[in-house]
Amino acid sequence: MSSKLVRDVMHRGVITCWADERLSDVTQRLREYGISAIFVLDASGRAEGVVSQTDLARAYVQGGWEHRTAEEIMTPEVLTISGDVPLDAAIQIMLDKRVHRLLIVQGGRTPNRPVGVLSLSDIVRAMARASEMQRG
Amino acid sequence: MAAKLVRELMRIGVTTCQTDTSLVEAARTLLSQGLESCIVLDENSHAVGMFSRREAVAAFGRSGTDADGIRSLTVAEVMRPDIPEVPPDIPAPVAVQIMLDRGVREIYLMHHAGGLSWPAAALRFEDVLRYLTAASDAEIADLGAGAPRKSPLEAFMERYSRAR
């Protein structure tokens, strides 16, 4: 298990929204996909931020929630990591930075192309699976 | 429009585990029920802490992602002893601010009596967001103190059938 890499555990595919999307639409998408955060793309398709349940809750407390856009409330810092990084290093980053997810990017012809997400849920699921496999 | 109160958006009934529950079993419960956290009870059913996905991941990281090391851990060894708590009769935005300040996505309504504490209900970010996007109150009829819920006998029978 100690040799596991991020790509062995992450889930593929990234759910996104546009920077100018209304929060009501963003929240509907979170519910539709059963996820707790969505990555915000700029006009060029680059991930420029993330809107999480926490960001939405903060917007609710501030008021005027329904008239605001993703860009206005997103956390602008998107933490990215390669799928080839050891899982325990990724866990350390998530704990140190107190984030629930990392965006997985791939190099190659299109550098920094988002290919997946590593979330706390993915890690907990991997932990449960690893324990089950050893027992079985 | 007046803000909803916590008691109108909370979920009655809280998932719990025992201090000697294995970390892996508790983590599976969180995943299967789509929860961020659960409350840890001691042998007197007194709430002594909270176990969340973050504690599970931290323990996994400390063990060097070693499955053997993880399997031997119990919830008592990794839980956080402070349970974030709110009263039911405050406005939901105030409760959400408390959750933001405490860095949690679920917060609990606790009963305290006879020196014991136990969880009665929980408020979750997810449910607040459901309320915000609900087209009508019918969509959130499962939330709040007035939500229909199983009788203790029905709940027992359901647990009994699951265990068989």
Image: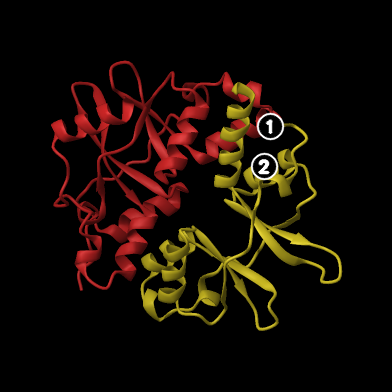
Q: Position of residue B81 (x, y in %)?
A: 43, 29
Which residue does the image show at 60% across and 28% down from the upper left?
Answer: A131
Q: Is residue A64 above or below residue B48?
A: below
| Residue occupying the far right of the picture | A109
Q: How is the image coloured?
A: by chain
- Labelled pair 2, 1 in contact (Cβ < 8 Å): yes
Q: Position of residue B137 (x, y in %)?
A: 20, 66
Shown in red, the chain is B
Which quadrant would residue A132 be assigned to in this image? top right
Residue indicated by mark 2 = A91
Q: Under tag 2, what secondary structure?
A: helix
Which residue does the image show at 21% across and 48% down from the upper left?
Answer: B88
Residue indicated by mark 1 = B65
Q: Nearer the viewer, residue B36 or A63?
A: B36
Label 2 crowd (10 A; few <14 / some 14-19 / many >=20): many
Q: Which quadrant is home to the C terminus of chain B?
A: top left
Which residue does the image show at 20% across and 34% down from the upper left?
Answer: B155
